[in-house]
Structures are given as structure tokens and as C-alpha cells.
Amino acid sequence: MNLQAALPMLNNPPRSPRAGWRSAMMATPTLMLSDYWFLAGLILALLYMADPFMLRLDKIGPTKHLPLMISLGGVLLASIGHRLFPPLSREPLPRWQILKAGLPLILLGIWIVIGSLYARKHSGINNTFMTVGLYMLFTFLAARMIVLSPARANIVRRYLLAAAGFSAFMVLRMAAGVSDKTMSYHELEALIIPLAVYFALRPAGPGLLGSRLMGAFMTLFFLAAGLVFRKNTGFLVLAMTMAYLWIVEWRFRFRESTSFRFVSMLWIVLMMIAGIAATAYLSQQRGALMPSGNPQYRLKTYEVAIDRFKHSPGWGTGFTAPATEKFTAYEIDAAHGVLATHSDVLDLAAHGGVIALSLWLWGYVRISVISMRYALGGRSRTDMRAAAHALACMSLTSIVVYAFNPILLQPAKAFLMWGQLGMLLGVALHFSSHPGHVTSGSKTTAIIEIKP
């Protein structure tokens, strides 16, 4: 055992988790102007999604890209500040670490932007894939923000708590039946339901919000949100979120705690009873409340995308074709029938071919490997690790959501989705640069290595 490293622990014995949580909060670096700008863009996008006043700001030309522009201002300020005033107490950052980690998705994003510019300038096509490419590239600007900011833990924590607040409003609004078809918050399942991961894994802290009881309540609340959506996508995200929690935490606690086993079995029984009751009720309603997915229309759009892929399986159209099409097979009121394919993955295949799909899959695999190696391993009970798991679950389930919905063409939704993936990558890269430390909030503690 390294006695020199152990002396500080002997002089300052470990305190209770609650005291440690309070100490970590007090030691957390305060947000700077650049951090506030970055967070402001994310929170504005969350406001767009909740849309409490039904203004549909995410659909209006002058405002739909505003969250991105605000957060970009924060990233720019952080980059300039890091160049002008490099922190003396920190080790130099590895060169090109973000570029190396995200190279496949960066190449794909640049390709999409170039193809969209060509379509706009030479073919006069306005409905291009520009949004897909630009917001995909924002992933790595968000990662840079997390890597550069000393208050990275504060940024991630505040974002998740803000997302929890807006998500609670949306879930309650849906449960109360206030929202209509245009305000059902469908396509946000991957934002709302995986918040349960954060509250299930974060350590207990002072006050009501940090109590274990509140953590358990919020976990069950956001898991129950999967049923409130009444969408097949919501059910899939719910199943994936519960499987994620089982893999990273619940399977250990099930073996370790008798009380947890009892509560788990009770919860399973209650869910089965609720499911049987809901099925009986919905069957009496003749399917009026059952999930809808317009399968005939969706299959028609899928057929068009698959035919386009077969015509050019290598590189598709090079993203030089329109991103939306006029469908005449069915009467569709939304956007006068001019809609995107109800699958962003099929759009990548149709317009980018095997090359685009390979870059897309390769990019996710690279980020997943880095995240699992540095941010998601073990059972660390720190707030930062819990946040990383929540961001990982959000990013994973978002693939399912945009595999069956056109998310990547919608600025605010794409902004949040890619921003979450970028923050996860930033957290993982931070841990990779500090392999001998664990982070609780922003408090750094040396690991004592014990050798036989």
C-alpha cells in the first residue's frame, strides 16, 4: 500500500456519504459566462420541447436554430478563454483527442453539409439535409465544452435537473390529457424516460431533492412515463431503460439486499396487475387509446427509401436530393403531405448508402468503447458517473427513436440528442485524461492502489 497516499486519509477519515456529497457541492467550481451560455442554449431547447404556451418556436424560421447559436457562443467563449488564460493547475490536454474519438461522425457530418450545400446552390433544393449534418457536428463542440470547463460536473448536473423539471411538466400534461395530437411530446421518449437512470444511480445528498426516497420516487416516475406516451416507441425505450438499469445496478442490489428483492417483486406484481387492468380497459375502448403508428403510410415511405438504397447502395444520392418528399398515396394533413421518411436510419441508407451507414455505426462504436472504458465502468457512486450513465442511456435509446421517427431533421430535438452524446463523450475524455482520479461532483480524490 502507498503509505504516502494513505496519510491524508488517516488524518482525514472518510465521512458519511451525505457529508461527502455536501463537501463535493461546496468544492464544485462555479459556472463561468461561457458555461452559462452553453447551458442557456440547452435549456432553451428544453423549453421549446415543453412548449407550455404552445408557441411552436421550434418550427419558426427565426427561432428554431436559436438554441444552437446560443450554445455555440458558449463553446466559442470557452475556447478563447482557454487559449488566452490556460489553467496553470491542469495538465495539458491531449492533442486532437476529440477529433480522434469522433472522426467517423465528423466525416459523415461534413459530407452531409457539403452535399446539402451542393443541392442548395446547384439544384435549388431548399429542403436539404443541412440540419442533419450541422447538428451532428455539434456533438463534438459539446464534448469540447465539457473537456475545457472546470465546472463540467455542474453543467451536466444542471442540464439533467433542468431536463427532469421540463420532463415532469410534459409527463403530467400528457397524463392529464391536456395535450392534443400536436402536443403529445412523441419523439421525446429518449429524453424523458432515461432520466430514471440518473435518479436511480446518483448518490444521496442533503435536502429533499437529494434524499433516497425522492430518488426512488423520481426513478419510478420517469419509468412510468413510458406508459403515459401510449406509443410503441415509448414502450421500447422503457424496456431498454429498465434493461440498462438492471445491467449496471439492479442485478447487484438484487443479490445484496433482501429489502430490494422484496420491493422489486412487489413492484413487478403491481406492474403486472396494472398492465392487465390497462389492457382490459383499452380493449373496451376498441383501440382508441392504443398506440398508433400509421403503419400503411410508414411502410410506403420505407419502401421509397429502400428502393433508393437499392438503386445506389454504395453512396446513395450523396445527400444532394431533397430531405422530404410529397407522398400522394394517402391523404396526409401534416405539412400538406410533404414529409420526411419516418426513419432517419433509412434516410442515411437511402442518401448515403453503405458508406454513410458504416461511418454512422463506426462513430457510435468508437464513442461507446471510450465511454465504457473510462466513464461507465464499475459501480462508482458519484454524481458524475450517474450522469454519464443517464447520458449513455439517452444516447442509446435515441437510436431506437430516430430509427422510427424523423428526429434528425428537427433542429431542437436533434440539438438535444447530439448534445447529450457530446456531453457523454466529453465526460469520458475527461476521465481518460485523469486515469488516477475519480470525480464526485467536481471534487477529485486520489485512488490508493493496494498491491500484494
Image (cartoon, rainbow, N blue to C red):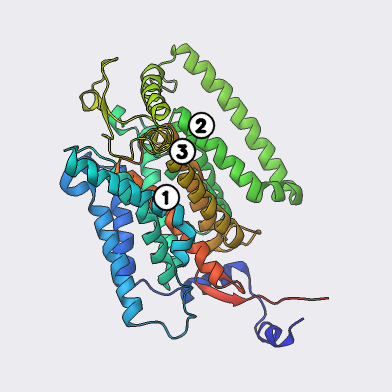
> Considering depth in this image, is 379 or 122 the residue closer to the camera?
122
Residue that numbered label 3 is attached to: 354
What is the distance, in whole Å, between disc 2 and disc 3 at their CAs? 30 Å
Q: Which residue lies under the disc numbered 2?
A: 235
Judge by depth and name the residue closer to the eye, 277 or 333.
333
In the rendered structure, which amino acid carries the disc numbered 2?
A: Phe
Question: Does residue 190 sit above or below 448 in this rendering?
Answer: above
Q: CA distance from mark 2 to mark 1?
A: 19 Å
How far apart marks 1 and 3 lie (CA) works out to 37 Å
**Residue 164, disc:** 1
Q: Residues within 10 Å of mark 3 (few under 14, many from 20)?
A: some
Q: Is residue 368 left or right of residue 252?
A: left
When asked about the image quadrant of residue 289, the answer is top left
Question: Is residue 215 visible to the viewer in this orientation of the structure?
Answer: no
Q: In front of the other: label 1 or label 3?
A: 3
Across and down, in percent, residue 325 comes to 26, 27
- Residue 378 visible in image: yes
